Every structure is written in C-alpha cells, then in structure tokens.
Image: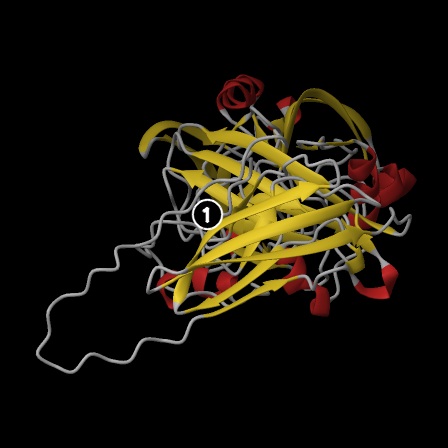
Amino acid sequence: MGRFVTREAAIGKILAATAVGGLALTLVTACGDDQAKAPAFVNPNQAAAPSASPTAPPVPFEFAVTPADKKKDLPVSTEIGTSVKGGEITSVTLTDKAGKAVKGNLRDDKSSWVPSAPLKYDTSYTATVVATSAAGQAETKKVSFSTRGKSGNEIGSGMYLFNGKTYGVAMPVVMEFSPGIPKKDRAAVQRRLFVQTDPPQPGVWHWVSSGTQAYYRGPEYWQAGTKITVRAALEGIPLSNGRVGDQDRKASAKIGDKFEMKVENKTKKMQVFKNDKLVKTFPVSLGKPSTPSSSGTLIVMDKQEHTVFDTFAELGPEEGYRTDIDFAQRLTWGGEFIHSAPWSVGDQGRRNVSHGCVNLAPQNASWLFGQTKVGDPITIRGTERKLEAGNGWTAWNLSWADFVKGSALPVPDSLKSVGSTANATPTPTPTD
C-alpha cells in the first residue's frame, strides 16, 4: 500500500475533472428537449363493483397548487406542488413569459410535477394545473411565479457514472459532495436524486455518516444487461448556510455480464467467476500482517494499464519505494489495488508479502485486466483488517437491512427485505 490520499484531497481532484455525465477518477500513487409538450395523464377506471352495502359518501373534492400565486425569488429547482382529494390530476403545463413550454413529469405519488431541467434564473413562469373530481368535474388553477438570480455559494457535487459506459453488476450510483450534506438537508437532496432501471429493479439511497457520499443500489446485484438512467437534479436546490446545489447531472449507462472475483486468505487463491461459472483460479499474495489487505466486498473503481506507485510520503525513506506498476485496478481510496507483481510470484499462493494489494503474476494480471469492468465486485475474506466504511465504494459491504437504514427518506416495507419483489425504484420520476 502506498501513500494514503485523504478523501478530501481525492474528491478535490475528482471534482476538478467533473463532466456533466459524471466524474473521471484520478489514479493516485498507491498500492495498498425543453419545448416538448407536457404529458397527459389518464384517469383510473372509476367503475365500482356492485355492492349490497350502502355506498360510502364521496370524498369532498379538494384541490391545491403550489407555489403561491405571484411568489417571487424561488429557486430554479422549484416543483409544481399538487394536492388533490376526491379526484385526480389531469394535466400540468408550465410556460415562461414568452409562452415557451417547459417539459416535465408528475412524480409517481403525484405530489408534485418536476421540470425535466432546471428552470432559468430571473425568469417568470405560469403553471396551469387541471384536476378532475370523482364526479367528472374539471377544475383549473393557474399560478405565476418568478425565480431568483444565480448564487455563487454552491456546494460541490459529482456523480460516478459516465454516459454510454458499461459497468459491472455491483456498480452503485455514487454521488459525492464537498463539503458533506448536513443531516437536515439530506432528505431534500435525496428527493432530487432520480434513478430508473430497465428492466425495473428496486433500489434505495444510503448516506455515509459524513454526508460526503450517497450510494444507490438494490438488494441484489444488478441484472446483466440492465440500463440505468440517473438524474441528480440539484442545481439551485436550497441548502443550509445559504448554500445551493451546483448543477444538474444526467447519465445513462449499461450493466455488462456478471463478473466476480473471490479471494480467500487461507488458500491465498483468487477464484474468478463469469455469469456464475468458475473460469479461472489464480494464486495471490495479499498484504503482510503489518499492512494487511481489507476483508469485505470491494468494487473495482478505476483501471490503469500502466502507472507508478510512490510510497515515500507514507512509508518514509527507509521503506518507501517508487515502482512502475502494470494492470492496476483500484479497490480503495487508501491505496489497495489488484496489480501485476512479478517480484512476488514465488510468494503467491504461499505467503502474504504486499503492502495491502492483491498481487498477481504478470500473465494473470494481464488476463484479469482484460476481463474486468469498473463496478465488478471482489470479495476478500480472512485477513487481519476489515474494510472501513467509505474507504472506496463500500455500498456492498453492508447487509441490505443495514443499507436501507442509511436512507434519509422513509423506505417502503416492500423494500426492506432481501429479495424484495418490488418492480420499480422508489423515486422513478422520468430523467429525460
């Protein structure tokens, strides 16, 4: 294991490389359309089955819309709130002062209508909402409002998901925040993080204690071939201390074949599985007792065919080294990698001599590098150290029961048990 890089320093480098679709991982030295019409919504079947019992009185029709009419200085993340009793929302349209329509969709629970992109700063808008009572009577409400100017006090954010890329089955959606999101703001932020999967699979967001990261995953690994579409709709969202979200981010990615690695310290071997079939077994050398490898379920975070490990800053002039490394695959922020280690071939399968990395013979490391994807899982068992939360993408190092406890929003009971049969993600507002 080489020089430990703090998450703050790593996040700083990562945020500097931010793209709209996601973030580029910087390998550090180590071992160890807005004009579209708003959609129409179809009322559910109102027919009731015959009953001998007296018919219950109808629920009085009540209909309210937010924001309040003529409201000013609203954030560009403003949603059109809709509250209806004894009826249904029929349509929502939003136009700017020039009459240009804004595209958007209702949330699944129809609590609000979400624009598909941030509203414009210092701009006036008019929302027209139509609701229909159970008796078939339509009512229309209009509200006008204006947005505030752009703030310079933004919180940094980033999303680990590149548009058009293919990832492994364990790839969580990872959001980074700098500084971390305070607990009192996390529910508001989480409500603006939208994930869709095709085919549909359930999932939940989990916040690390510092608020610097939030992961989204399901109770099981993603199905091979899954398409994941994400929108982090954070631009202008009001946060504590006068801060606001920096920008919206969108990405759509695909999940590839299931590819797993399992390492046992006792045998000092790595088993490689593709679509649940054992395809290779390799001898390995793990971290020696003074610098053990981390046990747990880790995820390939980044890959570089050639790099340099420099450990002088961490280990000092006597034990430090600077070495060219081939086929490096990052597993932790702290510097644990899978990589080629020709110098330890004689030890591989016999004893642990590394500074925390998983050492492989050159030909084995080369083959593995050619097969893996960012997001592939590797499980390491039986070492002297457990994987620390947040040291890498540690979403899969928690049981599902513990993972759902990290949500800032209530989790439906149907999602709290492993193998939930829920057929949709909890906040699947369209992300187009």
The amino acid type found where label 1 is placed reads Lys
- Work out whether residue 71 can be spotted: yes
Residue 68 or 263: which is nearer the viewer?
68
- State the image quarter where residue 165 is shown: top right
196 with respect to 127 (left or right): left
Q: Quadrant of the N terminus?
A: top right
Provide the secondary structure element on which disc 1 rests: loop
Tell me which residue sits at (44%, 40%) in the image: 197
Query: Mark 1 sits on what residue?
Result: 266
The x and y percentages for residue 198 are 40, 36
Tell me which residue sits at (77%, 41%) in the image: 120
Residue 134 or 11: which is nearer the viewer?
134
Q: Is residue 403 above or below residue 288?
A: below
414 with respect to 292 (left or right): left
Mark 1, residues whose alpha carbon is within 10 Å: few (<14), some, or many (≥20)? few
- Give the colour scheme shown: secondary structure
The x and y percentages for residue 188 are 66, 61
Residue 176 or 195: which is nearer the viewer?
195
Q: Quadrant of the C terminus?
A: top right
Q: Is residue 153 above or below residue 1?
A: below
Tell me which residue sits at (75%, 41%) in the image: 97
Tell me which residue sits at (78%, 37%) in the image: 14
Residue 349 or 185: which is nearer the viewer?
185
- State the image quarter where residue 104 is shown: top right
